[in-house]
Amino acid sequence: MNLRAIWAIYYVEMARTARTVMQSVLSPVISTSLYFVVFGGAIGSRIPEIEGVSYGAFIVPGLIMLMLLMQSTMNASFGIYFPKFVGTVYELLSAPVSYVEIVIGFVGAAATKSIILGIIILATASLFVPIRIEHPFVMVLFLVLTSVSFSLLGFILGIWAKGFEQLQIVPMLIITPLAFLGGTFYSINMLPPFWQTATLFNPVVYLVSGFRWSFYGLADVAVGASLAATALFLAICVAIVAWIFKTGYRLKN
Amino acid sequence: MSTEPIIAVSRLSKTYDTGFKALSNINLEVRPGEIFALLGPNGAGKTTLISIICGIVNPSSGTVTAGGHDIITDFRAARSQIGLVPQELAITPFESVWNTVSFSRGLFGKPRDDAYLETMLKQLSLWDKKDSNLMTLSGGMKRRVMIAKALSHEPRILFLDEPTAGVDVELRREMWDVVRTLQASGVTIILTTHYIEEAELMADRIGVINKGAIILVEEKAELIRKLGRKQLTLHLQKPLDAIPPSLAKHRLELVEDGTVLHYTYDTQGERTGITALLADLGDADIRFRDLETKESSLEDIFVDLVRNG
Ligand SMILES: Nc1ncnc2c1ncn2[C@@H]1O[C@H](COP(=O)(O)OP(=O)(O)OP(=O)(O)O)[C@@H](O)[C@H]1O
Ligand SMILES: [Mg+2]
């Protein structure tokens, strides 16, 4: 293992965040706060409690997930797309680093940012609504698994993307709808039966459900199923990344 | 020379995804400590060859070793010896010179060594810019930063893909000095250039590549000697309308309104034919005011080679 190389990549990526701290941290915090003002305060006050949890508190895990998915994907995709764009990727390819090390560096940094962000949002949320965490260990597990999986997804996206539009289109067109339809703002039990079944094909449902269970012990799907689905998603991303590096897809001619 | 080659390319071919065959059956050995110049017209395959050796492009077939290590099966050992300055300028905006150079060193797995980086940046006249944002540097400075990045991990082998393209005369001289200093410290240097005089000045050996094939590898001095032609120019006292038939066998060229005769001969030939020519000129009663000889440059040789190769 070229640990120094991993550290070098990780460090530069984290430094990039520090430079752009406004957009990396402040903007998600502000948008989350807005969600709370609107959904938690204004609208939420007219929505009855869901299984004993106030609506404002109910949406906290979903909101954190929403931000994690978006930020992990965007951060990691930008991290690897940028060197491709400016041409400095030649250095990564010509350095004595294995693909695993490159991935650990980029994905590790993106996931770290997401986790920090998740914690900041949680802290922000606790200013608005009372929050309890029944299963902190599981909560951290979901936080980490989700951040890593979606950072991997972002990494794949960044390698695949041929332009900045493509880089933005996936989070906009895929992640956002999946997250909104994944039970972020509601329990899927509130849906008509057909949609309850259809939703089960949405991977985000498992993430949100599992994550919410770690807070309030409420789950749309069994926690075991949530964990399994998350692990499966992670495994698929790992497999795609392995394939990308094996073939040099969009990295090497 | 019996020393092991530091770079050994064997039966290397590359066909790009587009179906374009950029390299065909390249065999090449670079000796430790030498400056090897790779010459060839645009699109000849120089960058492709370098990119394969450095791990940026996948070979289609054939093998390459660097310092005795296979570039694929033993890529860590191979790559850690190589520094690359690519043809295209590529820098990370918003990064400082110091940080980008430190990053490169770390990426190559070397422990931090501020003293070394300082010496190197000073050598490249970049020390006073060490905290500058890369975006604020001039083109020539950026190119030097690229060199600094390549040298940051103390490579034994340095690839310079057109290091002096778009660089002013003074800076070019500076770069030549840097290259010589590096060679003196034992670094092997492989460079490409379109400035033939640069190769003539710097290289120990020269390889010429054209349309994806190596057409020649030779010691520079040997190359000039072997392929060198000399031209004898005779300035005539009276202009000629045509070359007299008695001189036809010398294959002369009459130029400048009949006032100048050109005679080209091979320095390697058993005899140059000059004595016979001068005698025949005397017989034909052609007198000259002045005469000079000129040796063909590497540039002439190169143009000849590529045209006929
Ligand atoms: N990624 C690619 N896909 C397809 N063809 C390519 C690719 N890269 C290079 N080529 C082709 O391969 C040939 C060799 O290119 P290369 O860049 O190696 O030439 P070069 O000798 O470095 O030329 P120059 O002096 O202009 O830098 C060219 O015809 C080029 O068009
Ligand atoms: Mg080139």
Image: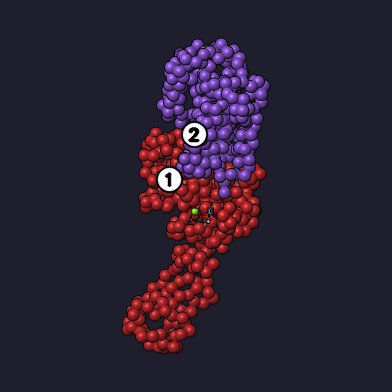
**Residue B75 versus residue A245: which sits nearer the camera?**
A245
Q: What crowding class fits label 2: few (fewer than 14 Cα within 10 Å), some (14-19), or many (20 or more)?
A: few
**Residue B253 versus residue B49: which sits nearer the camera?**
B49
Q: Is residue A231 left or right of residue B179?
A: right
Query: Which color is chain B depicted in?
Result: red
User: From where the camera sits, is residue A204 visible?
Assistant: yes
- Indicate whether A166 appears above or below B177: above
- Residue bearing the label numbered 2: A172
Residue drawn 52% across and 19% down? A59
Q: Are marks 1 and 2 in contact (CB under 8 Å)?
A: no
- Residue bearing the label numbered 1: B143
**Residue B2 versus residue A252: which sits nearer the camera?**
A252
Give the alpha-carbon distance from disc 1 to disc 2, as whole Å: 38 Å
Query: Which color is chain A depicted in?
Result: purple
**Residue B119, how many percent across, how many down?**
45, 37
- Indicate whether B227 appears above or below A172: below
Numbered mark located on residue A188 in the image: none
- Residue type at numbered disc 2: Met
Q: Secondary structure at mark 2?
A: helix
Quadrant for residue A145, please give it: top right
Residue drawn 42% across and 52% down? B165
**Residue B235, how many percent across, how many down?**
35, 78
Q: Secondary structure at mark 1?
A: helix
Which tag is nearer the camera, tag 1 or tag 2?
Answer: 2
